[in-house]
Image: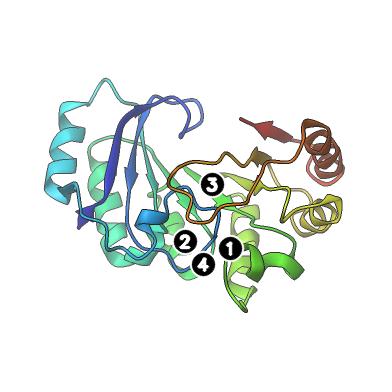
Amino acid sequence: MKIHGLQKMTLLDFPGKVACTVFLGGCDLRCPFCHNAELIDGAAPAVMEEEELLAFLKKRQGLLEGVALTGGEPLLRGDDLLRLAEKIRELGYPLKLDTNGTHPERLRKIIDGGLVSYVAMDIKNSPEKYAETCGLSQMDLAPVRESVSLLMEGRTDYEFRTTTMAELHDADSFRKIGEWIRGAKRYYLQKFTDRDTVPFEGFHAPADGEMAQYLAIAREYVPEAEIRG
């Protein structure tokens, strides 16, 4: 498997652990605010092969405490991702998976296989605004809803998170998201940060007062809601 990026050490991507972050190319969404837009179509050059990654992880045993798999959308790799996850777990590393929730059957496989210790799933917006927020003209939300339900079964540790933008979110967005994920274990609101890698211009983070309002709404449904970043 080709690896499209590697952050060799992070204190942020895997809660409570010193980890590295592995970036995998390819995504089935086209979010216009994506920070990793160069990975969307999987055409970005790979930085290493799977064997090189495993060699790196073997050398870092005892220094790193976990591995975060992100993208793009890692679950697009299907059984190849499962095999990579197995090899990483054999080296003794807990795994964290970032996902957009569009492949619940693959998410279920990696959870049922005991291969993942933590899942971070994006909740892009309220159902009515989901397709627009994902850069699509229309979208079947059934798979995303299935992934939400799967994680809320509690068979692995997890969080939901929303990257929040002034142009795409308002108070009603968070009321409807809250109704959707009511009783979730934890939920993070992340302020949008503009970067050179964001494919479209014109997006802004909400003002601090608006973020505080959105957090108060979210906590009505998920008491363990916080603002991250």
Q: Secondary structure at mark 1?
A: helix
- Give percent across and percent down for residue 121: 56, 52
Badge 3: residue crowd in 10 Å (few <14, some 14–19, many ≥20): many
Residue type (three-letter) at the residue carrying disc 2: Leu
Residues at marks 4 and 1, CA–CA distance in whole angstroms:
5 Å
In this view, 27 is above or below 14: below
User: Is disc 4 in contact with disc 1, using a CB cutoff of under 8 Å?
Assistant: yes
Quarter containing the N terminus: bottom left
Q: Earlier in the sequence, mark 3 or mark 1?
A: 3
Residues at marks 3 and 2, CA–CA distance in whole angstroms:
11 Å
- Where does label 3 land, which residue? 120
Q: Quadrant of residue 138?
A: bottom right
Residues at marks 2 and 1, CA–CA distance in whole angstroms:
7 Å
Badge 1: residue crowd in 10 Å (few <14, some 14–19, many ≥20): many
Would you say 179 lies left or right of 165 here?
right
Residue 107's mark?
A: 2
Q: Residue at x 26, y 50 (%)?
A: 4
Q: Earlier in the sequence, mark 4 or mark 1?
A: 4
